[in-house]
Amino acid sequence: MLSRELWTRIVNIIERDGPIPFSRYMQMALYESGLGYYVNGLHKFGAAGDFVTAPEEGPLFGQALAALLDPLAETLGPDWTLLELGPGSGALARALLTSLDRPPARLLLLEPSAALREVQRECLAGLTDDLRGRVEWIDRPPAAFDGAIIGNEVIDALPVERFAIEDDGPYRLGVGVENGRPVERRLPADDRLRAALAAIEADLAAPLPPGYRSELCVDLAGWIETVTAPLERGAVVLADYGYPRREYYHPERSTGTLVCQYRHRAHFDPFCWPGLTDLSSFVDFTAVADGLVAAGLDPAGFTTQAGFLLGSGTLDRLEAIEDPAERARRTGEFKRLALPGEMGEKFKLIAATRGCALNEAPFLLADQRDRL
Ligand SMILES: C[S@@+](CC[C@H](N)C(=O)[O-])C[C@H]1O[C@@H](n2cnc3c(N)ncnc32)[C@H](O)[C@@H]1O
């Protein structure tokens, strides 16, 4: 029902204005008021949802981030602020607040979805009054602060443009309607897409060949600039699945990285059940690194999730767990987060700083900066 209502809304726009760019379709499929995937109030996260993120697996990811942020908190002093972008279920916020030796004076949760804010409120309800009292929800970046900005799996949820390279140049892929069904349409590439593609190709060994299809987040640098602008002194840490640019736009990855998730099954049809299916695309970490530098931040690390967990003392924390059953559970969690065939290599963390140093050790064990 919900999916049909959303599709009807999309069809009405296409019938009125003509085919829409894929980025507009993705924006509506994920965020259309009351109906989009992230705002419709249906369950998304964890075993009963559509996908499991690192903080959903258990506390280890949050504990590793806490180990990174505690020394920064010591430098910044007790009034430091933590801003989490796109907190999802609230699992990372909870793990951080309960793991940090020096919890922030304020934990700001930037969450556009009212439905997810309620999920986050419930997730944090069991915290002490003191910790819960530090949490504030915001719908736009706050005023200037000293502290840290974190975001796990937020960039992959930003709408992307899809493009196809043909013999006569690039096309922007869009969405039209045929017999009431969504169909892909080729639209002319606008100047923004052409400029973004030229910047990508300048980093590749050869131009993208005819027949090549992929996607890119044209608004990424602007988004990074906006969300990091309030940070006066501190660090930004963004985690997601993705590749450095030369691997992302590798000749063999010629159909792009867009992926849809429904009840723990991945599929590749973005028109299937809009509003009920998660749509996301892998992250071009070179674009993220460029965006952070363009926003005036200093690069501080780029590594795999496995490298980050190992480099920030996760094995010591596992060994210190006394209860054998709990240690076995957390060891299982560690394997899911860190094994190369699971989340260990595909997921990466990138960090940058402004006006202060970050403990770079967690980024050095599997340092990937030379691949950016
Ligand atoms: C894939 S979920 C990740 C949730 C959580 N960080 C985790 O790791 O489990 C994406 C989250 O980003 C939020 N989001 C989407 N666009 C956003 C934006 N422009 N700014 C901040 N958050 C955004 C979504 O509402 C959702 O909470």
Image (spheres, rainbow, N blue to C red):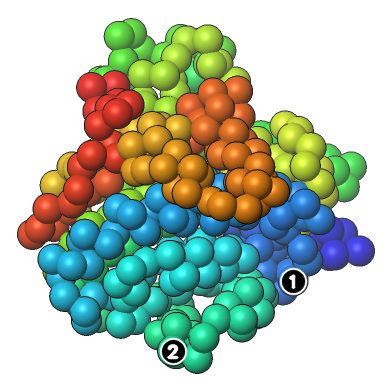
Question: Which quarter of the image is occupied by the C terminus?
Answer: top left
Bin the neighbour count of mark 1 within 10 Å (Cα to Cα): few under 14, some 14-19, many 20 and up.
some
Answer above or below: position of 179 versus 42. above
Give the quarter of the figure containing the N terminus: bottom right
Give the numbered dot on residue 130: 2
Q: Is residue 290 above or below residue 205?
A: below
Q: In the image, which is nearer the foreground, mark 1 or mark 2?
A: 2
Quadrant of the rendered structure where residue 290 is? top left
* Residue 226 in the image, given as x and y percentages of width and height: 29, 63
**Residue tagged 1:** 41
Q: Residue at x 70, y 48 (%)?
A: 325
Would you say 56 lies left or right of 308 here? right
Residue 136 in view here: no
Pointer 1 or 2: first along the chain: 1
Q: Secondary structure at mark 2?
A: helix
Q: Nearer the viewer, residue 242 or 150?
A: 150
